[in-house]
Amino acid sequence: MKTIGTLLFTLILSGVSAPRCGATVYHSNGSVANVQALHNAASDGDTITLPAGTFTWTSALNITKGITLQGQTTISGAGTANPIINDGTIVRDDTPRSGAYAYILAARMATGTQSFRLTGITFTAGTTTVLSPGNGPIRLHADTENKNMRVDHCHFDHLYQTRCIWINGWCEGVADHNVMERRTGIGSTEAFLITSGRYGNDPQGIGNGAWADYSRYGTDKFFFIEDNTIEFGAATDTDLGARFVFRHNYTINAIVAGHGTEGGSSRGGRANEVYDNTFNWTQTLHGPSGGQRSGTCLWHDNIVTGTPSSVAGVICNFTNYRENYVRAHPIWGIADGTSVWDANDTEGNGRFVEGHAPHLFASGSATVSTPEGTLTDSTKNWTPNQWVGYSIRNTNPASASYGIGCDITSNTSTTITHPNFGGAGHLIFNSGDTYEIHRVLVMVDQNGRGKGDRVAGDPPINTTTGMASWNYGALEPCYSWNNVYTPKGHALGFNSVSPTTIASRDYHNLGAGFFAHDATPLIVSLTYKAALNGVNYFGTFVYPHPLVTAQPTSTASTTACSLLQQRLDRLQRRHQRLKRLHIPHQKLKRRLQRVQLQLQLQHCL
């Protein structure tokens, strides 16, 4: 009774308004303690308001209810160069800078029906000038598929934080009409960290579910970032099977980027659409507006303006980190033509045959010690550049570089040159070090690849083969069209610096000026039909996002769709296994067709 009485007294002082349509509005005094107490008393669907004023928060706010947290900050013109901001409600960030609570606010939804919204709050630096090492001051997490989480009309005002918003779990909501301003001098920063680890009911939460599913372009199965003004080192950073749509934003010196499948057992970014954005560059020296290290993407109708890019004609660079030793000893192995996770040249003629050993194209010993980045074997008489696109690895067990490999960029009759990543493990060939030359054809989760066999475990295994092996990731090519550098009217496209990401196979630059604004080229629609995409792709998902326009999202059949999709995935894995063993199974094919028809009838596809 004492606890209840204390809580009731708190609610009376806080000014609880009368319920409306079954929901309650709680008026907080702006302190983190009061907001937390009101949250603990609230129910899903309720609203907690913060008054105008400045409030110092010294502890983190933890939200598990489907509530709206609403302040008095207003923003108009977000998504343009000159948004108008009225900082009505200001939260000063003096929250912890270490441990499990190094954030300002964390919202975690346990069900897909909960609806969380954060709106109208300015977050600014407090007296604490220690840089937070965490993954962002605002964190959204969904334990299961949730399309109802939104952050809007918030101002992130030069915080001592390396990131602003972390999207985690299976969250498919929207962040819109925010203004995000980076504090200079604090190193690498990203406005959004997007990780879709639990997508597809992945129990490990490291992205395996996303990589076992279709891209599903044109649907709501992404996190949407739209109509924001972003001035950061990077607008996005991604990992764990991230899936996002970045549209109608105005960025200042910020790139759209993400990680690949390259380090531990976690997977890289899975799929993204980037369109109708303005990338404004005020820096004299900068790279492209995007950098992608895994998965597939569609970039179109973007404008790049300001100072010219240091990489002419490029809007997004593709790199595959495992093709070199920037990640010296990844769990997936270096993609040097010998890792079991890649499709390697096993026959010496550009063919991969499962179960066959990687083909050895050349071997020998270094005849002299050379600086890092080169190998010399004076016994050879190679044709110049015959090994470009192949890989070299050190095979001397006595060498500190044993087992490390790298792609080859050039060769003479007696020397081989490869990228130099000194400090990342070191690939050095001293006199007497033995070497081998192999070739990787397609690396796991590389740019332009997508849905494959389900992977699980740590260390990971391919659940179809029951061992560590290539997952047969589908060719899901990246497309670029109508991206323009406006000062000169130049068309911008993709560029690859990796030998396995190949133009006209893994990515296509369709140019500019040949398509109406926001129209989908026929080649894209023909490529991303339901067999490859999970649903026929005719164009982008509805804009603005349904949460912005207060239109309901379809959640009634979410559970049924999820169960059907899990059944389909199991049948497809079994079918692929039998197919590789050349075992016909007509009954299984009919079962696959029936489940696909059920998915269509449930409007899941």
Image: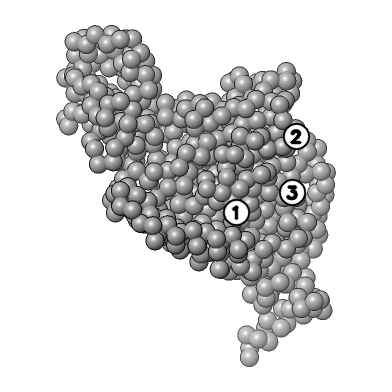
Return the x and y of residue 576 as percentages of the image width and height: 37, 51
Compute the Cα span from label 2 to label 3. Answer: 14 Å
Label 2 vs label 1, nearer the camera: 2
First reached walking from the N terminus: tag 2 or tag 3: 2
The answer to whether mark 2 and mark 1 are in CB contact below 8 A is no
In this picture, residue 79 sits left or right of residue 363: right
Asked whether the viewer can see residue 394, the reply is no
CA neighbours of label 2 inside 10 A, class few (<14), some (14 to 19), many (20+): few
The quadrant of the image that shows the N terminus is: bottom right
CA neighbours of label 3 inside 10 A, class few (<14), some (14 to 19), many (20+): few
Label 2 vs label 3, nearer the camera: 2
Which residue is painted at 68% across and 49% down in the image? 541
In the rendered structure, find residue 543 and report the number of the disc placed on it: 3
Residue hosting label 2: 517
Residue hosting label 1: 221
- Please name the amino acid that badge 1 sits on: Lys
Return the x and y of residue 75 as percentages of the image width and height: 80, 49
Return the x and y of residue 106 as percentages of the image width and height: 59, 60
Compute the Cα span from label 2 to label 1. Answer: 24 Å
- Please name the amino acid that badge 3 sits on: Tyr
Which residue is painted at 49% across and 32% down in the image? 506
In the foreground, 557 or 269: 557
Compute the Cα span from label 1 to label 3. Answer: 14 Å
In the foreground, 242 or 151: 242
